[in-house]
C-alpha cells in the first residue's frame, strides 16, 4: 500500500495534508524519515510513525450502536440527523455505514461497519437471519394474530411475508407488548405487518440480529466495538 494512501485512510488528513507532513519530515518508516508518499509499505509488518505516534493500521471496523429515535439509518442527509452523526471523528474516518435500516423513530441494535462483504452476507435474503423486535402495539393482539404471522401476512402492496413469530408479552388497557421475529427486511416491515392485522405499532425497538444481541449495558446513543465472539459470529455468516 502506498504510504500516502495509508496515512490518509488512517485519518492523518487529505492527500494534500499528508504530502505536507511528509515534506516536513514528520513521517518515519522503520526508523527512517520518508518524504515520498509513493513509497509502498506493508501495514502489517512495517513500523510507521507520524510525529512520533505509531500508526496502528486497521482496514475494517465493527461497531454495535444503540440507535436512539430521531436519527435516520443513512450516511449523509441534508435535512435529517444520521446515525453517522453519533460517531466520533476517529471512527468516521473509516467511512462506516449502517448494516440494514431502522426507521427514524425506531430504537435499538444497529451494526456499523465499513466491511461491505460482511454487510452483504448479513443482509442477504438467502441467509434468513432472524431479526428480533420488542414492540408496543395500540390494540389487543390475539392468538389469531399469532397464527396470521406464522402463516405470513399480506402487506399493503400485495406482498406476502415469510412466516414470522409473534409472542404476546402483556395486554392491558388497549396496549399490547409483543416480541416479533422476522427473517426479512422489507420497508417498515414490522409496522406494516401489525397494520395488516388491524393494529398500530406505537413503539419499536430491535433487540437482536441473528446471535448479535443488543448490549443491555449500552446506553441509548452509545456504541462500542464488537467483542471477539460477536465478530466471529458476524464473520461466519
Image: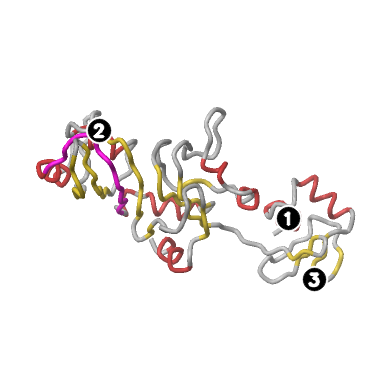
Q: CA distance from mark 1 to mark 2?
A: 50 Å
**Which residue is tagged 3?**
30
Which mark, by number, is residue 26? Answer: none
Q: Earlier in the sequence, mark 2 or mark 3?
A: 3
Secondary structure of the magenta portion, mostly? strand
Does 136 appear in magenta?
yes
Which residue does the image show at 23% across and 37% down from the upper left? 194
Is 85 placed above or below 41 here?
above
Q: Tell me how the rendering is colored.
A: secondary structure
Q: Assess whether mark 3 and mark 2 are in contact (beta carbons under 8 angstroms).
A: no
Residue 202 x %, y % = 30, 35
Badge 3, how many Cα within 10 Å: few under 14, some, many 20+?
Answer: few
Is 201 placed above or below 7 here?
above
Which residues, given as a range, are shown in magenta? 130-142
Q: Quadrant of the C terminus?
A: bottom left
Is 51 placed above or below 120 here?
below
**Which residue is tagged 1?**
7
Residue 123 x %, y % = 38, 49
In the image, is 120 to the left or to the right of 46? left
Which mark, by number, is residue 200? Answer: 2
Residue 88 x %, y % = 62, 49
Does 28 appear in magenta?
no
Q: Earlier in the sequence, mark 1 or mark 3?
A: 1
Badge 1, how many Cα within 10 Å: few under 14, some, many 20+?
Answer: many
Nearer to us in this view, 224 or 21: 224
**SS state under label 1:** helix
Residue 158 x %, y % = 21, 30
**SS state under label 3:** loop
Which residue does the image show at 35% across and 61% down from the upper left? 211
**SS state under label 2:** strand
In the image, is 93 to the left or to the right of 4? left
Amino acid at each position: 500500500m502506498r504510504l500516502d494512501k495509508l496515512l490518509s485512510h488512517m485519518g492523518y488528513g487529505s492527500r494534500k495534508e499528508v504530502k505536507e507532513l511528509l515534506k516536513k519530515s514528520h513521517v518515519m518508516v522503520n526508523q527512517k524519515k520518508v518524504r515520498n508518499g509513493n513509497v509502498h509499505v506493508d501495514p502489517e509488518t512495517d513500523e510507521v510513525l507520524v510525529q512520533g505516534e505509531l500508526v496502528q493500521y486497521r482496514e475494517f471496523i465493527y461497531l454495535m450502536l444503540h440507535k436512539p429515535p430521531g436519527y435516520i439509518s443513512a450516511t449523509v442527509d441534508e435535512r435529517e440527523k444520521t446515525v453517522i452523526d453519533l460517531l466520533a471523528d476517529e471512527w468516521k474516518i473509516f467511512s462506516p455505514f449502517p448494516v440494514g435500516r431502522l426507521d427514524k423513530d425506531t430504537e435499538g441494535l444497529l451494526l456499523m461497519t465499513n466491511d461491505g462483504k460482511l454487510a452483504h452476507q448479513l443482509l442477504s435474503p438467502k441467509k434468513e437471519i432472524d431479526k428480533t423486535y420488542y414492540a408496543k402495539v395500540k390494540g389487543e393482539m390475539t392468538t389469531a394474530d399469532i397464527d396470521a404471522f406464522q402463516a405470513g401476512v399480506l402487506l399493503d402492496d400485495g406482498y406476502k411475508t415469510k412466516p414470522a413469530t409473534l409472542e404476546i408479552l402483556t395486554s392491558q388497557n388497549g396496549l399490547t407488548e409483543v416480541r416479533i421475529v422476522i427473517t426479512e427486511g422489507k420497508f417498515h416491515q414490522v409496522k406494516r405487518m401489525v397494520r395488516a392485522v388491524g393494529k398500530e405499532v406505537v413503539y419499536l425497538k430491535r433487540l437482536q440480529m441473528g446471535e448479535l444481541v443488543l448490549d443491555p449495558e449500552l446506553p441509548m446513543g452509545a456504541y462500542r466495538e464488537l467483542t471477539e465472539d460477536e465478530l466471529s459470529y458476524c464473520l461466519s455468516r
